[in-house]
Image (cartoon, grey):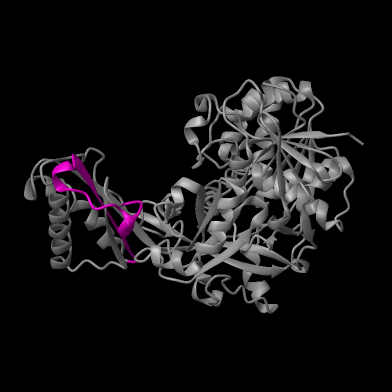
Amino acid sequence: MKEKIRIASGQGFWGDLIEAPVQQVTNGQVDYLVMDYLAEVTMSILQKQMNKNPKLGYARDIPDLMRRILPVCKEKDIKIITNGGGVNPRACADAVLEVAKELGIRNLKIGIVLGDNIKERIEGLISFGNDFKNMETGEPISTVKDKILSANVYFGAMPIVEALRKGADIVITGRTTDTGLTLAPMIYEFDWREEDSHLMASGTIAGHILECGAQSTGGNFLGDWQSVENMAEIGFPIAEAYPNGEFIITKHENLGGKVSFETVAEQLLYEIGDPAEYITPDCVADFTSIKLEEVGKNRVRVYGIKGKPATDFYKVSCSYESGYSASGSLTYSWPDALTKAKAADKILRTRMENLNLKFTEIRSEFVGYNSCHGPLAKQLNEEDINEIMLRIAVRSDDYKSVERFGKEIAPLILTGPPAVTGFAGGRPKPSEVVAYWPALLLKTFVTPEVQILSL
Amino acid sequence: MKIKLKDIAHARSGDKGDAANIGIIAYKQEDYKILRKHLTAAKVKKHFKGICFGEVERFELPNLRALNFLLHDTLGGGGTVSLKLDAQGKTLGAALLRMELDI
């Protein structure tokens, strides 16, 4: 058994720094590169892409990235784990194999994890008594059943572990929890037993710290953010993990960023509910048990973690069509910038009313004044305001109303308050709103399937 | 005595469906005691009047010198549906730091 392993985070979301994974594998020694690509909305986008072309449906950045990192990962024996397979892990693996062939790489094994996509099975599962009740609102799924775009269960670490045990150098999954990507190599390398909930919780919490990339190494840090060095070359986090469940959060020394009690604590608190009950498919982790200790420059030891056994359920994430939305903006300058922006807003609303346009919601925000903090924003003296951007957004089930809204913004330039600019992007187009439906499903109804593709 | 939260704590916020979560962390152990005693769910609910339309839940994490708040019915329908510029509540942590505590 290895004495320790170093797991590097390479992406916090699809669209994160493209250079980060390259930096992680070239700037120092790591054993694993883990990359989270999937947000809730991503699955529906990928599902639509696959509906149009069966060879798509995965994070298309991956083949290009692999072209850059595969040779070095092969040379240094760095394994890669990602959920960027989206709704089509096989197509993603095929594309990576193509790249590997072109690079002349031999002896490559790619593990794919399938079985999370339950879109075609929803009807059947409902008839078996699963109600897929909305976890937040308690509503039955019947209200949206016919509008479902994608439906996936979140798998945990174990299917990835199976792929690693079958010799995979790269593991590409569909909807896997972000935390499972990091926990899996620990289970595999240290022979952890699934029943040991404290260890499962330790690896899960390491995963939570890594899953948003540089958000634990000084990015988006609301503490003393100006003390974060060289943010231009910010280093993404690395978990140096030990068999007893302890780990150290650090980063490559030659890159920028900061790892401290504060930066790690902020990430630990990111998007959590009840900290004593952080539920994943692998365990229920207790964030109130976590101990943090700064043990060196940019090195934070994380230990003492406790957990409880996993529940009998998988979380299901469904996305469904929910009408259309659009937003547009115009910028008004001094003098009376805010008054002008408010007048323009009123004129626009009156015109839309006169046209009988139907909206579920119209929202106006005054960027530069209150778009972030709403009623908490400090009152400003009109004389001190240099400029205000009016941002107005609408949502409706009626496509035509949203489309017409898009045509009513630009006319304000010549038919509204003066000293206005900032309409260069053309008419705002209606975009489809994809809403999200979280539910639970008994684990016994779904079986992960692991396959190995070899070169 | 009045204390600005900004001077004793930092924060991070994000979305959980239509709820926003705000984690607030004291820089010092003694200031965590102030947060724990004075920064109640009711005060947070009042602070976010006009932004948070649901219940506010509070959780304690003494190990991180932190409190976690869940602000329900806050994000205008949640991540993908919301018309807000800050649909994910990313700036609400900073908004909480505007608060002054009377201690």
Q: Quadrant of residue A132?
A: bottom right
Tell me what residue is drawn at x 60 percent, y 38 percent: A213
Relative to A448, residue A337 above or below: above
Query: Residue extending furthest front?
Result: B1
Q: Which residue occupies the foreground of this view, B39 or A406?
A: B39
Tell me what residue is drawn at x 59 percent, y 40 percent: A263
Tell me what residue is drawn at x 73 percent, y 25 percent: A73
- Taking the image as drawn, is residue A242 in sight? yes
Q: Position of residue B57 (x, y in %)?
A: 54, 68
- Total number of numbered labels? 0
- Taking the image as drawn, is residue A174 in sight? no
The quarter of the image holding the C terminus of chain A is top right
Q: Position of residue A101 (x, y in %)?
A: 71, 25
Which segment did they paint magenta?
A371-397
Q: Quadrant of residue B77?
A: bottom left
Q: Position of residue A74 (x, y in %)?
A: 76, 24
Relative to A257, residue A89 above or below: below
Relative to A311, residue A255 above or below: above
Left or right of residue A264, residue A142 in this image: left
Q: Quadrant of residue A133?
A: bottom right
